[in-house]
Amino acid sequence: MLKRLQMGLRAFMLVASKVWSCICYMFKKQYRALAQYQSVKYEIYPLSPVSRHRLSLVRRKILVLDLDETLIHSHHDAMVRPTVKPGTPPDFVLKVTIDKHPVRFFVHKRPHVDYFLDIVSQWYELVVFTASMEIYGAAVADKLDNGRGILRRRFYRQHCTAEHGSSYTKNLSSICDDLNRVFILDNSPGAYRDFPDNAIPIKSWFCDPLDVSLLSLLPVLDALRFTHDVRSVLSRNLHLHRLWDPPAFVQMKGVAGTPQSIYFPLVRTFNAFQNIDNNYYT
């Protein structure tokens, strides 16, 4: 009798454990969905006649977007130490074949990335430039695009320049030979070391559901489209790129990412836009 009771108790505990795990999984998934909307959205107002005129005087600019740790974070089956807390549900799973071996990637989207892409696609031509393999990068870009046709132009590892063994740099002039109107958003300063005047740094993202980095950049990106030359603004942040040298950054990238204070000079720049390129506008 006692043995039956023990067996029944074990079975009950096993079922209860599975039910609790299921409840926790659903709660975390709903929490992540709600966290996407926990911040105030960036309001877009109709342009005034003066702003429309100013915008008509400049060419449409190109925003180049990195993928991993900028827009998304992923880990795969073979990772010994996943960077995401165990039990955190992915936004989607990719199944790709690499060197004849099937690999599953569990992909997590940075908070507000869908909203961010919706907004900036109205302001800029968007280009994906990732140092990842094409078979993986193309699948991620397809998921982010979600049939909207906003991420048509894509560059992958084969379009990068290999340096320092496992690091890659991205040549922005291969995307557009007019550097006045092209810039990149990337968490890795080493990737744009040849184009520091054409870059906006962003902290590396791994799993923080309350991250608002993409939302924080919208005021700057809204204003930057009015400039004649993006470098007239972005060159003001050169001191921030010196926070990393290639070897040190490789060591710290997976630990701390980019300091939050990196945004403050950019936000201050937004307030100074009235005085930029005045000769061009008048």
Image (spheres, rainbow, N blue to C red):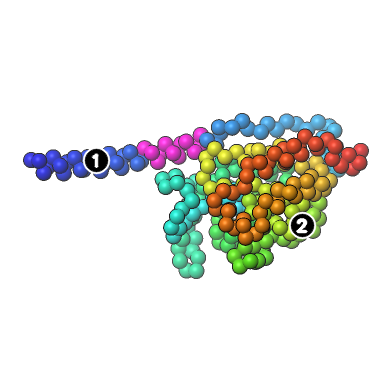
Tell me what residue is drawn at x 44 percent, y 39 percent.
28
- Magenta residues span 23-34
Kindly state the secondary structure of the residue where label 1 is placed.
Answer: helix
Tell me what residue is drawn at x 75 percent, y 56 percent.
195
Residue 25 within the segment the image draws in magenta: yes
Mark 2 and mark 1 lie on one chain; the one further toward the N terminus is 1
Compared to 130, does 84 lie above or below?
above
Compared to 268, does 97 lie above or below?
below
Tell me what residue is drawn at x 52 percent, y 40 percent.
209
Q: Are marks 2 and 1 in contact (CB under 8 Å)?
A: no
**Image coordinates for residue 193, horizontal then vertical, percent:** 71, 58
From this viewpoint, is residue 64 visible?
no
**Image coordinates for residue 181, horizontal then vertical, percent:** 79, 50
**Image coordinates for residue 186, horizontal then vertical, percent:** 65, 51
The nearer-to-camera label among 2 and 1 is 1
Q: Residues within 10 Å of mark 1 (few under 14, many from 20)?
A: few
Residue 4 within the segment the image draws in magenta: no
- The quadrant holding residue 169 is bottom right
In-front residue for pair 100/192: 192
The quadrant of the rendering that contains the N terminus is: top left
201 horizontally vs 2: left or right: right
Mark 2, residue position: 176
Mark 1, residue position: 13
- Which residue type does callout 2 highlight? Cys
In-front residue for pair 57/271: 271
- Which residue type does callout 1 highlight? Met
**Image coordinates for residue 250, horizontal then vertical, percent:** 59, 58
Q: Residues within 10 Å of mark 2 (few under 14, many from 20)?
A: some
